[in-house]
Image: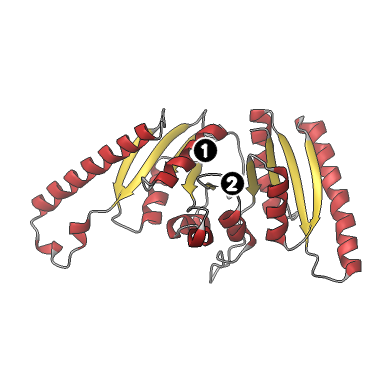
Amino acid sequence: MKEIMVATDFSERSDRALRRATLLARQFGAAISLVHVVDDDQPRRIVEARSSEAVALLQQTAATLGKVDGVTCKTRVILASPFAGILQAIEESDPDLLVIGPHRRKMLKDVFIGTTAERTIRLASCPVLMVNAYPAGNYRNVLQTTDLSDSSGEALQRVARLGIVTDASNTLLHVFDAPALRLVMSHTVPKEDRQHYLASEQKAALRNLTEFMSKAKLGNIVPLARQNAAPAHHEILKVAETEKADLIVMSTHGRSGLAKLLIGSVTEHILRTSQLDVLAVPPRRGK
């Protein structure tokens, strides 16, 4: 990585994202691009005042990063709606990675859909790292996920090229379906037959996963196939806990047509609920 972009609103959440970006920048010798968006749908005097304050804060932060962490940092203030400004910065700078803080969670009702985070992840052409946990060092245990699709393979190849998981222990999880166990009368099937069927399906899923990894040229990753006994996002989070993962890697959907409007329900659920960092990766640049 050469350039890591951080979108900041100067909140504690954004400070968390900046700290993770700083660790990555030091790890890879990359520069940081620190971006703040001022909502321009306000009276001019308010926009000007907030822009001036943002410039001063960004310059102070950049100076600290250079002096304390030895990281080169450039800054920019953009006048636009929050998510449009971030996308503009990505389009113009073409960073290797965008780092953002966790979205605001509400106790009674989650509102991830329609948030700046969701819209940015859905439309960004670069990988987006949502920093949910407090940074405490480089990533050590990474859980990557796949649905065995071509777009997922392309996304995982991007992850490998990014280098963010190179020095970590990596597991690639595929959550597979065992359709016969979902039939109405499946409970009447003898337990031994059910176990034999599930073992057969797991063996096939692991074989398909191994073939997928070979085709995508994904090396140094431990394959893992798990049945979707619960919804896929629950299985992913369960495995992440078992594997003591500190980063979950998810691919987003394709970048054309209706698919461009979707990030996939499983990815959405993970981004909405995970307490771990989540790296959302599009399969290819939409340029």
Q: Is residue 130 visible?
A: no
Q: Residues within 10 Å of mark 2 (few under 14, many from 20)?
A: many
Q: What's the residue type where badge 1 is placed?
A: Arg
| Label 1 with label 2: CB-CB less than 8 Å | no
Percent x, y of residue 155? 48, 42
For the residue pair 28 and 102, the one nearer the viewer reads as: 28
Q: Quadrant of residue 204?
A: top left
Quarter of the rendering occupied by the N terminus: top right
For the residue pair 19 and 286, the one nearer the viewer reads as: 286
Any mark on residue 158, and which?
Answer: 1
Report helix, strand or loop for mark 1.
helix
For the residue pair 23 and 119, the one nearer the viewer reads as: 119
Q: Could you give the CA–CA distance between mark 1 and mark 2, rounded to whole angstroms?
A: 13 Å
Seen in the image, is 192 located left or right of residue 145? Answer: left
Residue identifier under label 2? 129
- Total marks shown come to 2
Percent x, y of residue 159? 52, 37
Q: Is residue 268 visible?
A: yes
Colour option used: secondary structure
Q: Is residue 87 above or below residue 244?
A: below
Percent x, y of residue 170? 44, 34
Report helix, strand or loop for mark 2.
strand
Of callouts 1 and 2, which one flags the residue occurring earlier in the amino acid sequence? 2
Q: Residues within 10 Å of mark 1 (few under 14, many from 20)?
A: some
Q: Residue at x 30, y 43 (%)?
A: 225
Q: Residue at x 52, y 56 (%)?
A: 256
For the residue pair 251 and 46, the one nearer the viewer reads as: 251
Seen in the image, is 145 located left or right of residue 93? Answer: left
Q: What's the residue type where badge 2 is placed?
A: Leu
